[in-house]
Each structure stands twice: as structure tokens, then as C-alpha cells.
Amino acid sequence: MTSLEVRGLSVDIGRRTIVDDVSFACAPGTVTGIVGPNGSGKSTVCRVVYRALRPAAGSVLVGGRDVHRDLSARQAAQRVSAMVQDGFLAVDARVHEAVMVGRTPHFGPLGRASHHDNDVVADALDRVGAGHLRTRLFTALSGGEKQRVLLARAMAQQADLLVLDEPTNHLDIAGQLELLDLVTHLPVTVVTVLHDLNLAAAACDHLLVMAGGRLVAQGAPAEVLTTDLLREVFEVHAHCGTNPLTGRAQLSFAPRSACPTSPSIALESP
Amino acid sequence: MIDAVATESGAVVPTPRSRARVLGLVLLALVLLSAVLATSAGAVRIAPSQVLAVVWSHVGGLRSGGPAPHPIHDQIVWSVRVPRVLLALIAGAGLAVAGTVLQAVVGNPLADPYVLGVSAGASAAAVAVFTLGAVGGLGVSAAAFAGALVTLVLVLLLGQRDGRVDPVRLLLAGVALGYLFQAVTSYLQLRQGGAQLQAVLFWLLGTLSGAQWSSLALPALIVIASTAWLLLKARALNALVLGDEVAASLGLRVGALRLQLLVVAALLTAAVIAVAGGIGFVGLIAPHAVRLVIGTDHRALLPLAALTGGVFLILADLVGRTAAQPVELPLTVVTALVGVPFFLVLLRRQGRPL
């Protein structure tokens, strides 16, 4: 387990500033969620952390070392893994092979898989409950199975920090809850972008709220997700209650146009 | 990696790795068989035993006890057909490897060695030499090679955004430059007319008739060295086909890697075009055919695609030489007529166990 510290991070794509002076820290072993409306820069922060983008300013420290300046791409990938959506996956990859790709930053120059690599892959698959799938074709799996295999691939990388971008996309509700349950019980530090605020509130120790490329709030989910913040950042009316099943924060939403005259709808705000 | 895995039902499923081994052995046998066949067939039929005797007399010295081969047979086999078969093997392997790499690099299954416009540039330069005579002292081969490299530089300059090669831009730039150079080629052909036109057309559709021992060394060296280097990058290619984001998260420097791979693929293509003209379909079909059988692990895919391309082109050249004697067919005519139906059959079988 390792810590993540992001200091004064700014990212430009083309001439546009996508992320502007963002700073936060994640303690070892915690789960941090990044939420915010579309285009707020959530994914961009993640992409800088797993080195798909270089920052215009600021730094990303993992375990105290700057992933862009102190570490090579390979060294960084041994410390930070990511579960992102695939571009196109090959016609005929078996699950075992698909997960073996996660060993890429550990292979020697000849790229031979050792017994250790095989063990790591098998262990990762078992840990996500997909050990029985290893000879199946990846493309023939269901959405939930695919996501679990992709999580196993990220775990096979054996990094201490796991970055996830919308890991629950395309999953049914059971799949979403199962996947987040898996992720939050991994012995690694987790940073994840989530669209669903209720899932974020349920799964994360710490939330970062982004808007317009800036970090506008952070803290424990119950402190951060207030009706005022949701109105300002997400432009919705919200009611903050309690999930009767789990006892955690539970949000209900209505479009702003639905109650135009009652700005003080947040009657039961905690 | 494991070779075969027992499923829950108890059936043993061959993994792609063990399939790859079998396919590798089959292809090696096919290379030898097709090479002997192609060397013995032609206007003058020479028995396979004679072919082997000639080859043995050159490779193994004259220690063999049998009678010395007939001098004319020796001449035909050793000076004409063997270099031609070797060139087919080299060209087929080079195009197949280039196609495999380009499909991975641009993330598009339709990519082939010519998608970057490199062949169109090479053709324009070669046809300029054909029709206008030596340009700046370059022969056809050297002009084609130079044309390919100039096109590569242009397409890389046009295909980048913010200092990084962008696959979509690269494809568009390649296609656009391809049309431009094709226009130049067409103009030069029309301007010329007459007897030269047939030679030009033949070259544009690919021919191995110019094969000589002296012209083999450079393409052989480029194909072997490039393939060896690419094998070292096979794991990186496996990650790259999953997309730039995944590749970056796995510790690859995607921009630099893509540039290196493009240059190597273009070099392979240029080396083949320079000695064999514009042979179509091999670079598109060979990688897909192998992928359909063994999957996409580039450690197996690259060498097997190379062998497949080699065998395919040896046989295509054999058909081209012998099917319509005494007329010789250009290679692309054969590769398309024979290769496309074969490929379509394979495509229909996709996903079914062999």
C-alpha cells in the first residue's frame, strides 16, 4: 500500500487548460472517489496519475516519488496500475492471456512469462472470482465478467495504487455493487472516477468534487455531498437522506426545473 | 505458459500457445515443400531430386557421391529459380510482418503495408525512372526505396498532432498522399504509352522476375533484422492493441513506440517494394489468417505471419509463372484471385475450433 499526493496539478490539452491547480492526498489503503459533472477534468486527473498524460505544472507523488520525473514509464507502471476501457481487444484472446498483459511492466527483455507470472495471474483471477473463466475467450464474456477480468489484469500488475475510470460503466446494479465491493476490499490504495454519486458515497472513504477543471470540495462523503454543493456543481435539486439498508448517505435528485420556487428544498439536510 | 488446460467438463482445450507450435511446424514444412515444388516447376520441368542435388552441390560442396547435376539444370535451378523462391519468401514475410505491425499500430484491421501511402510514393518514383529514364542516377529499385522513405517522412509530418503521431490523422494523411502519388503515376503512364507501359503495369502489380542472388542480401537483412527487433517488442505490441490508455498504464511510452514501429514497418515495405514491386493482399491477409487460428499474441503472430506470407507468395509466384504459360501473371492478380477466397473461407470459420 502506498500514498498518493497530487500537488498543484495543471494539465493542458492543446491550448485548453483541462485541469487547473488541483491538489489532494490519499492515505495508504484508502478509497478515494472523484466525482463531478461531465467535462470537469476527472478522467484527466487520472490519466496524469497513470502517466497517459504529462502535467503542464505540478507533480504526482506515489509513495513520495514523482511518477513523471523520478520514475521511468516502466517503473511507474510497477507502482500504479489502471483499469480503463479497452480500445479494441483482439479477436481471440483467452482470459488468461488478457490478464497476462498486466505483467508487461515486469517482463524481461525477451518477454517470457515465468512460473511466478503465471501464479500472479492465477491469483489475480481467483481474487476477483474469475478463476473458472481463464480458458474462455474474453470477447465471449458478459459485461460483468469482462470488468472483473480487467480488474484482475490491473491487479496482476502488482502496483500499490490502482486507478479506475468509471469501472461500473455498462454493468447492471448487482454487477456495480459487486465490483465496487471487490475494489474496496483490495489491499491497495484506490482512486476511482464514479458517475453515480450514491455509489461514490457508499464505496469511498474520501471524495473529491471537481468542476471546470478545479477541485471545489473534498472530504468524507457525508460532509461533501450537501444539497448546496449538488445544486451549485451538478445543477440539480437533491435530498440527502440515509440508505435504510446500509446506513450510509443516500441522495435523491430532481431536475432544477422541477421545483423552481423552492430553493430551500433541502429540509432534511444533515 | 500452460499448453493445454482441462476445463470443468474434463475436456482438454488446446491453448493458443500449443496451436501456435503446431501451426509453426506445419508452416515450416510448407515452406520447404513449396520451395522445392516452385523450384522444380516451370517451362523446363526439373525433378525434385535433381533440384535437391543442385542445391546440395552448391550448399554442401561437392562431397556428395552422386553424379554432378546437368549444367543447364544447375543454371536454371541455382541462378534463376532458387533466388526467385527466396525472394518470394523474403517479400512475403516482410509484407506480412509489416501488415501485422501496422494493424496494431493504427488500431485498424483494414491496415496493410500500403496504408501509409508508402507504396504509392515508391511506385511514383519507380515509374518516373521507368518512363523518364534514370533520375539522379537512381535505378528502379533505389528510386522506389527513396520514394518510400520520402513518403514516410511526409506522412509522419502530416499525421501528427501536438508532436504525437495520431493514428486517425496518420491514416488520412496516408490515404491522401496515396491518391496524390497515384495520380502522378497515372500521368507518367499515360504520357509514356507503348511497350514501356506493360513493364510499368507489371511492376506496379508486383513481380519477382528480376530476382538475382545479388538483389537478395539487402531485403533479407532488413526483413530478418526488423522481425527480430519486433519480436523483442512483441509484449509491447500485445499491450498496444488494447489502446493507448491501457498501453500507457502498462508502462509503455506510446508515442515513441508508435513512431519506432511505423518507421520499421515502412522500412520493411520499402525494402520489398524496391525489389518486387507492389504486391497486394499478402500484408493484409496473412496477419488476419494467423490471428484467426492462434489469437493475437505477437510473439507467435509475427513469426507465423512471416512464414504464412512467405509460403503464400512462393505459391502465388508459382501459379503466376505456370498457370498461363508462356504468359506470366503479375503477383497481385494471383494473390487476389487465390488469396481472397481462401481468406473468406477462413473468416467464416472464425471462432470455431480447428
Image (tube, rainbow, N blue to C red):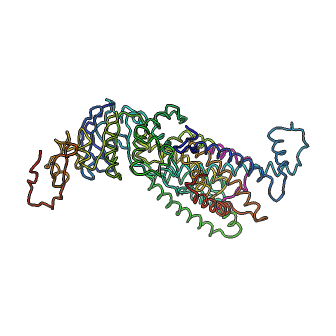
Name the residue nearer the viewer: B76 or B102. Answer: B102
Side (left or right) of B172 relative to B10: left
Magenta region: B204-223
Name the residue nearer the viewer: A27 or B144. Answer: A27
Q: Is residue A121 above or below residue B130?
A: above
- Measuring from the top left, give residue B131's x and y in whole percent: 65, 63
Task: Let me know if residue A39 is in the magenta part.
Answer: no
Side (left or right) of B250 relative to B7: left
Name the residue nearer the viewer: A41 or B182. Answer: A41
- Measuring from the top left, give residue B83's x and y in whole percent: 74, 49
Q: Is residue A130 above or below residue B126?
A: above
The mark tally for this picture is 0
Q: Tell me if residue A93 can be seen.
A: yes
Name which residue lies at 16% across and 48% down: A241
Name which residue lies at 11% across and 61% down: A260
The image quadrant that residue B114 belongs to is bottom right
- Measuring from the top left, give residue B232's x and y in whole percent: 55, 38
Side (left or right) of B201 relative to A194: right
Residue farthest toward the top in the current orientation of the protein: A64
Q: Tell me if residue B158 can be seen.
A: no
Side (left or right) of A198 relative to A267: right
Residue farthest toward the right in the current orientation of the protein: B67
Quarter of the picture containing the C terminus of chain A is top left
Quarter of the picture containing the N terminus of chain A is top left
Residue farthest toward the front in the current orientation of the protein: B9
Q: Is residue A127 above or below residue B89?
A: above
Task: Let me know if residue B212 is in the magenta part.
Answer: yes
- Measuring from the top left, give residue A178's x and y in whole percent: 33, 44
